[in-house]
Image: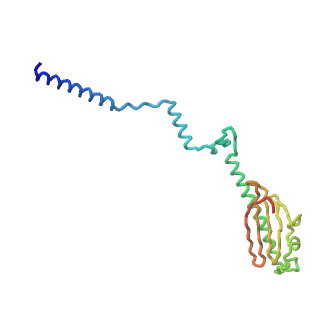
Amino acid sequence: MSNKQMMIIVSLILLIGIGIIVTIVIVTNKPVKDEVPNEQYILEQIKQRESQERPDNTQVADNTLKRDPVNQNEPIEITNKSSAIEQDYKDNEYKVSRELQNCAAMINQYYNCPESIGGADKNPLNVTIPKIIAFTGHFDGPQNSHTTNDGEFRLIASSYGIVTLKGMGIIKKDNQFALVTTKVNCNSGVIETRPGKGTEF
């Protein structure tokens, strides 16, 4: 076999090899037709999206109990109940404050009324607990107290025209009642109210 024939054979072999390699590359890089997701796959995607939108341990639309994330079988307090307690507590605190404001207004009225009709005649020394009770008709119970449907109210102290009142509500939140303190400065007519919490006066 001549050199020329050998060269032709080698060239053919090289061309065939290159053709095979190019074919393999084209086939391996050919994009695979997208698979159509089946029904099960779609349902799993929907569930996953819902779980991301609504975190664990939150109130769902049907007002079912929330579940403890540690023990799924143990129900814990629902959000709506907590909100209701919070609202009831605030309403009760407001009513206690309003009753104390009414009492404070009567004490200021007592201070400004003339002594001839049972008032203090603008004399701080006349602003005593027995006289306040007699004029207002309030705080005539044990420990200078009176009660309403919203709570218990006490006349705590009176000194030189400065009167301190307290009121405790009936709705508990975090094991405490609303405990409101009102101070009446008869000399200036100023009434100050400070909300608080507690279980006793």
- When the figure is inspected, residue 95 is found, relative to residue 33, above or below; the finding is below
In this view, the residue farthest toward the top is 1
Q: How many labels does the image show?
A: 0
Frontmost residue, 20 versus 140: 20
Q: Which part of the image, by quadrant, shows the N terminus?
A: top left
Q: Quadrant of residue 179?
A: bottom right
Q: Position of residue 125 (x, y in %)?
A: 84, 79
- When the figure is inspected, residue 195 is found, relative to residue 50, above or below; the finding is below
**Left or right: 23 with respect to 146?**
left
Frontmost residue, 115 versus 156: 156
Q: Where is residue 192 in the image (x, y as percent from the top left)?
A: 73, 70
Q: How is the image coloured?
A: rainbow
Which residue is found at the position 87% from the left and 80% from the top? 115
Q: Where is residue 199 in the image (x, y as percent from the top left)?
A: 79, 58
- When the figure is inspected, residue 144 is found, relative to residue 63, above or below; the finding is below
Which residue is found at the position 50% from the left and 33% from the top? 42
Q: In which quarter of the image is residue 168?
A: bottom right
Q: Which part of the image, by quadrant, shows the C terminus?
A: bottom right
Which residue is found at the position 55% from the left and 44% from the top? 53
Q: Position of residue 169 (x, y in %)?
A: 78, 59
Q: Quadrant of residue 34?
A: top left
**Left or right: 98 with respect to 142?**
left
**Left or right: 41 with respect to 19?**
right
